[in-house]
Each structure stands twice: as C-alpha cells, then as structure tokens.
C-alpha cells in the first residue's frame, strides 16, 4: 500500500533542519518499503511569522506491505522525538500519515498553506476529512506543513541537493573551497543556479547558521546538480547527501490580485501605476502603487541592495507590474518586492530655466522674474519643459540571489518571467 509521511517544524535557529530528518527517514524507511519518488521539500507561505527560515516542510512516499505500516510509524515518531529541537519555544513538531491516493481536499489545503494563513484547527479538520493521521508535539503547529507537504501538487519542480555535516562541527565555519564553487558555477550555471553572487564575490550554497546543512545546490537538471556537487571541494566530513524534489523557484506562491483584495501574508502580482515619488527610511526604499480599486505601499528593503537603484528610478505615472509578499511594516500593509516590470514609462519632464536670450548666460530666479547672472537681463519667469531620459528598460527587474525568496523563480530559468507577463496579456 501507498503511505505518505509529512513532517514539519522540527528545527530552530539553534540547530536541526527538517530536511535532515527527512533524509534520515528516507534512508531508514527505504529498507522497509520502496520509495515512489525522491523526498519532497515543500516551501509554504514565505510571509507567515512562525517560520524559522524558509518555511520548508518535507514529505516522503513509500510503497510498503500493510504489515510494515506499524513499524514505519514507529520509526518516524522515534526519529522525530530523537532529532527535533524540543527545547526551542517556537519549535512545534507535527507528523502526518496518509494511506492511498492524495484526495483533492488535501491538495486544496496545501495550496492554501502556500498562499494564505491557516490555523492548526483547520489542519486538524482537513486531516479528519481526508482520514490522515496527525501527531502533534507541543503546540503541534507542524501538522500544517506536514499535511501540506503530502498534499502539494508538485507539477512544476526543481531539485536541491543537500549535504550534511557532523554534529560536532555545527558551531564551526563551513570548510568549502570558495574557488571551487565559482568554478562549478561557471560550468553548470544556469542548470544549477544561485551558487554564488558574482557582484559581491560571495558563495551562496552554504548557510550560515548552526543547522546541519553543509551545502545546498539548487538546479533544474538533476544530473547536473549531482555533477556540480562533485566539483565542490569540501574540507570537512560529509555525513549524508540527499537530493530533494522541491517547489523552490517555481513562483507557485504568486497570485494576481486587485489591490482591494490584498491581505496580510499574501504573495501577489499587481498591475497598477506608481502613485508617489519614492521615499527612503533606514536604507529601505518605498513607493506607492494604485489600481482602480485602491492604493498600496511597496518596499525594496535594504538586503535587496542594488535592486533598490532601479526602484528609485520609478516615477509617478509609470505603469508597472509588481510581485512580492505582503507583510505589515510600521502598521501598514506593504508589498515586499521580489520582481517588477515597468510596462510603460511616464515621460520624465523637468522644468528648467532657459539660458539668457541676450548673452546665453545662466539665469537666476528673482521672485516672478529671471535675471541673467552675466549681463543682468531681466525677463518673466517662464520655465522650459525638458524630457529627461529614463534609466529603466522594458524588462523585469529581480532582487539579487541572496535576497531571493526560495519560491521566487530566477529570471534566468525558463518561465522566470511568465507569472508577471501573464498579467500583461490578461488586461
Ligand atoms: P525550514 O527551516 O525547514 O526551511 P522553517 O524552519 O522556516 O522551515 P518551520 O520551523 O517549519 O519553518 O516553521 C513553520 C511553521 O509554520 C510550521 O509549524 C508550519 O506547520 C507552519 N505553517 C506553514 N505554513 C503555514 C501557513 N500557511 N499558515 C500557518 N502556519 C503555517
């Protein structure tokens, strides 16, 4: 029989990672049954506040003999008890088991967990309806992700290879030969991507926390992801390697919306007009966008670095398509920009003083008059409209790799522009 296992919320900033537990279980359970596919790493709503890092949950599917189900369950529960970081107040593990085909209702729940906020009670109701068994530890919030990972309709997917380190090394810096990552990237990009940031000269495949992940290599081609990993020179012990199939880099989270329908924790695509000049606070850049239903604040936060330069080039009247996650900033609903596309640029008109008609000198404002600095000629203050060139091009702009949400599709991948451009053709 077919058994699906979902797990989530086993980690904390102090250690562990649900994918590690998933990899341990995948290996262990492969002795009791046949895996139907690679394990799945499913990223859910990136805007919800409880997440530790990327709001990831894990699902595994096996074909097993009915009499082995009891043992499978015992193994899963044992490993969660052994490896989850129960000491952290924000770690609330959950496990889900489902036998047989995935019901439509669970698929719908999964999409809801990707795009909205759901409650533990709602997850429990769905579990009951689809006859999934859930096990909660502490608050048990993890059952939301555990069920959603099982139900996720993974039509579009990418891969991530995760290599794990020894427990005793977890406080130490990751020992990876930087140059080898750059070399690997030059051979395999864009089949594997977000390996390095060439502008900053930094390596992106290594996390920085105390979690057990040593490197993560993302890609669209499974063979190349494995080859790429072989090329990275690692100078510490690798205890386990696992390839995951994932909804990362799919843009699955983005939903086109009118501004009046935008809610907290949504991830939206909006077509509208820039309705304010940009302003800055604490290195974050803000502006407003309006459509026929309302107005909303948009932000490019400090970590998006040079992306902000392009945001500053937007002016009121520009027609744009924007995409991003909705959070509250200073009590105001704010779209946290992931990508934007200037559909139509407004003319950038500046009003300037003319040169002196008599001697060509520069004019100075004197109340209602202009006066030539050189010859003293006076004339009524009539300014000239000059159209300044716009720095922006008609192309999609995206945040740099290290500021990218896991779910956001890099433009370099096929279809990276589709979600935004869909809105272009629709209206
Ligand atoms: P990871 O580190 O594995 O990438 P994460 O650590 O960022 O992921 P978790 O520790 O798993 O995130 O915490 C996220 C919690 O939020 C989990 O309990 C999960 O069940 C829950 N959750 C996921 N999606 C939603 C949602 N849409 N609404 C409410 N809760 C959710």
Image (cartoon, rainbow, N blue to C red):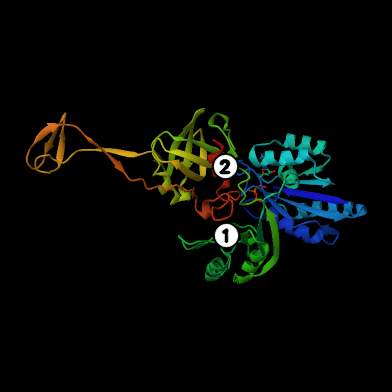
Local SS, label 1: strand
- Ligand 1 resides in the quarter of the picture at top right
Task: Out of 175 and 385, give the one closest to the viewer.
Answer: 385
Residue identified by numbered label 2: 422
Give the residue at x 47% y 48%: 395
Q: Is residue 41 above or below residue 422?
A: below
User: Where does the image place residue 397, in percent across and percent down from the top left?
Assistant: 48, 49
Local SS, label 2: helix
For the question of whether residue 314 can be seen, the reply is yes
Give the residue at x 45% y 35%: 273
Give the residue at x 74% y 41%: 107
Number of numbered discs visible in the structure rendering: 2
Q: Is residue 272 above or below residue 159?
A: above
What is the residue that sits farthest to the right in this orientation?
67
Considering the image in quadrants, where does the C terminus appear? top right
Q: Quadrant of residue 361?
A: top left
Asked whether, in this view, residue 194 is left or right of residue 164, the answer is: left
Asked whether, in this view, residue 27 is left or right of residue 289, the answer is: right
For the question of whether residue 140 can be seen, the reply is no
User: Where does the image place residue 419, in percent across and percent down from the top left?
Assistant: 58, 44
Nearest-to-viewer mark from 1 and 2: 2
Q: CA gap, disc 1 to disc 2?
A: 24 Å
User: Where does the image place residue 175, in percent across and percent down from the top left?
Assistant: 58, 68
Q: Residues within 10 Å of mark 2 (few under 14, many from 20)?
A: few
Residue identified by numbered label 1: 193
**Mark 1 or 2, nearer chain start:** 1
Asked whether, in this view, residue 257 is left or right of residue 242, the answer is: left
What is the residue that sits farthest to the left in this orientation?
375
Q: Residues within 10 Å of mark 1 (few under 14, many from 20)?
A: many
């Amino acid at each position: 029989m077919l058994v699906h296992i979902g797990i989530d919320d086993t980690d904390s900033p102090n250690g562990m990672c649900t994918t590690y537990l998933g990899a341990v279980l995948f290996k262990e359970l492969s002795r009791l049954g046949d895996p139907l596919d690679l394990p799945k790493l499913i990223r859910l709503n990136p805007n919800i506040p409880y997440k530790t890092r990327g709001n990831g949950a894990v699902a595994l599917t096996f074909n097993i003999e009915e009499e082995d189900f009891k043992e499978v369950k015992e193994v899963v529960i044992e490993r969660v008890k052994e490896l989850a970081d129960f000491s952290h107040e924000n770690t609330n593990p959950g496990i889900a088991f489902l036998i047989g085909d995935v019901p439509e209702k669970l698929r719908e729940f999964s999409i809801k967990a990707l795009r909205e906020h759901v409650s533990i009670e709602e997850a429990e109701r769905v579990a009951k309806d689809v006859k999934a068994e859930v096990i909660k530890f502490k608050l048990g919030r993890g059952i939301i992700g555990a069920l959603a990972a099982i139900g996720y309709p993974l039509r579009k997917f990418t891969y991530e290879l995760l290599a794990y380190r020894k427990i005793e090394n977890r406080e130490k810096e990751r020992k990876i030969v930087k140059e080898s990552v750059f070399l690997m990237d030059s051979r395999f990009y864009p089949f594997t991507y977000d390996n390095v940031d060439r502008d900053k000269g930094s390596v992106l495949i290594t996390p920085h926390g105390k979690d057990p992940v040593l490197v993560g290599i993302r890609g669209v081609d499974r063979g190349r992801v494995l080859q790429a990993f072989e090329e990275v020179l690692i100078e510490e012990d690798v205890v386990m390697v696992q390839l995951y199939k994932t909804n990362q880099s799919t843009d699955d989270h983005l939903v086109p919306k009118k501004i009046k329908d935008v809610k907290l924790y949504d991830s939206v695509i909006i077509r509208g007009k820039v309705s304010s000049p940009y302003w800055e606070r604490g290195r974050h850049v803000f502006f407003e966008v309006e459509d026929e239903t309302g107005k909303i604040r948009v932000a490019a936060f400090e970590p998006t670095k040079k992306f902000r330069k392009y945001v500053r080039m937007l002016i009121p009247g520009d027609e744009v398509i924007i995409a991003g996650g909705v959070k509250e900033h200073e009590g105001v609903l704010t779209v946290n920009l992931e990508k934007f596309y200037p559909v139509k640029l407004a003319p950038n008109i500046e009003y300037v003083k003319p040169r002196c008609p008599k001697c060509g000198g520069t004019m100075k404002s004197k109340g209602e008059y202009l006066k030539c600095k050189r010859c003293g000629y006076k004339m009524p203050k009539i300014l000239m409209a000059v159209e300044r060139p716009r720095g922006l091009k008609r192309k999609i702009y995206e945040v740099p790799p290290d500021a990218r949400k896991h779910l956001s599709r890099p433009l370099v991948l096929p279809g990276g522009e589709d979600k935004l451009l869909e809105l272009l053709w629709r209206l």
